[in-house]
Amino acid sequence: MAKVLVVTSGKGGVGKTTSTAALGAALAQTGQNVVVVDFDVGLRNLDLVMGAERRVVYDLINVIQGEAKLSQALIRDKRVETLSILPASQTRDKDALTAEGVDKVIGELREKFDWIICDSPAGIERGAQLAMYHADYAVVVTNPEVSSVRDSDRIIGMLDSTTAKAKSGGKVEKYLLVTRYDPGRAARGEMLRTEDVLEILSIPLLGIIPESEEVLRASNLGSPVTISSPQSPPARAYFEAARRLEGEKIDVTVPTERSGLFGWLFKGRS
Amino acid sequence: MGLLDTLFGRSRSSAPVARDRLQILLAHERAGTDGQESELLNTLHSEILEVIKRHIPVDQDKVQIKVDRGTSVSMLEIDIEVPALEKKKLREVR
């Protein structure tokens, strides 16, 4: 059965789009059918990070408004054949995104794919609400920094109250993904420790992605880091996170100053 | 001492401060977003203020009410800051 996952955060610039691309590509490389959906209408970027910016013909809004079929708007990734992207509209107003429209598109995607990964826009407005509405799972992307943690707390509250799952008495399965983690600064007490963030937000840990030039390099190249440099520390962390999403119980590797390869083990909460 | 702190990185240890500030702030914000709780707090706030105002002039912002929900014990904290009363005035209100 198809699983709908929202990648969300509240705060902008913490790595939602990068994480959507990297997790999507990691899951697709295990042979599952994955679609990544950009919900940031007016400020789309998932197409760019995925290297599909010149292949966009139709978008999510065209499908919602009946101007194109879903199959016309889906772009198949050239490197991983089980990975597709549904871009957002760059020109339309964000009001073009309607609850009924999103409902219909997610329904259709559920028939075609194993994983539907929704890249949420920043903020707590309608775009973010619609991106999380149908979610079965949520990845809350958080930087170890006060404003990001505060916004994540707000988003967790919304996941527990304004989603379809919450309204039917269920629960969205929420996971914390710490990104831009700098082991050196954390060791020197200059950066919130993952344990602190976990204690404050109290949702289980999906992974810790170290700050790395490989992530910037990947977006420069238009390739998810899990495709462009699969052996790099951030890519390994994303692969681990993807396995955890699949239900595997593996310990979270905490990146260390020595490039994260000699990570000591840290038990994730569940 | 300043040099030692710099050498051992003690003075740069700002993460614990960040953690403590967040814990206090979020405890407050979570209480505020819970519909029922926030309604109760608003009612308490206006009624307590009303009673105090009958006797002492007090600023609306100087009445702080907080609920800390614990597993076994919950605490209702009411913090009222009153202006320094002159003796004469105090006698009047009495």
Image (spheres, coloured by chain):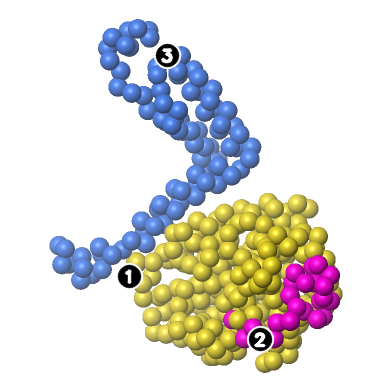
Chain colours: A yellow, B blue
Pick the front one: A216 or A192: A216
Between circles 2 and 3, the one closer to the viewer is 2
User: Which amino acid type corresponds to the residue marked 3 in the rendered image?
Assistant: His
Measured as percent of width and height from the top left, residue A240 is found at 59, 80
Q: Mark 1 points at which residue?
A: A188
The image shows a total of numbered marks equal to 3
CA separation, marks 1 and 3? 54 Å
Residues tagged by mark 1 and mark 3 found on one chain of the structure: no
In this orientation, which residue lies closer to the viewer: A142 or A176?
A: A142
The amino acid pointed to by label 2 is: Arg
What subunit carries mark 2?
A
Q: Earlier in the sequence, mark 2 or mark 1?
A: 2
- Where on the picture, by quarter, is residue A31? bottom right
Image quadrant in which you'd find residue A177? bottom right
**Residue designated by label 2:** A54
Q: What secondary structure is found at the residue carrying circle 1?
A: loop
Identity of the residue drawn at 48% across and 23% down: B49
Which residue has dot 3 on it?
Answer: B55
Q: In which quarter of the image is the C terminus of chain B?
A: top left
Residue in the foreground of this view, choosing between A43 and A138:
A43
Marks 2 and 1: which is nearer the front? 2
Which residue is drawn at the image coordinates 44% and 59% (left, top)? Answer: A146
| Amino acid type indicated by mark 1 | Arg
Magenta-drawn segment: A49-73
In the image, residue A33 above or below residue B67: below
Residue A175, placed above or below residue A258: above
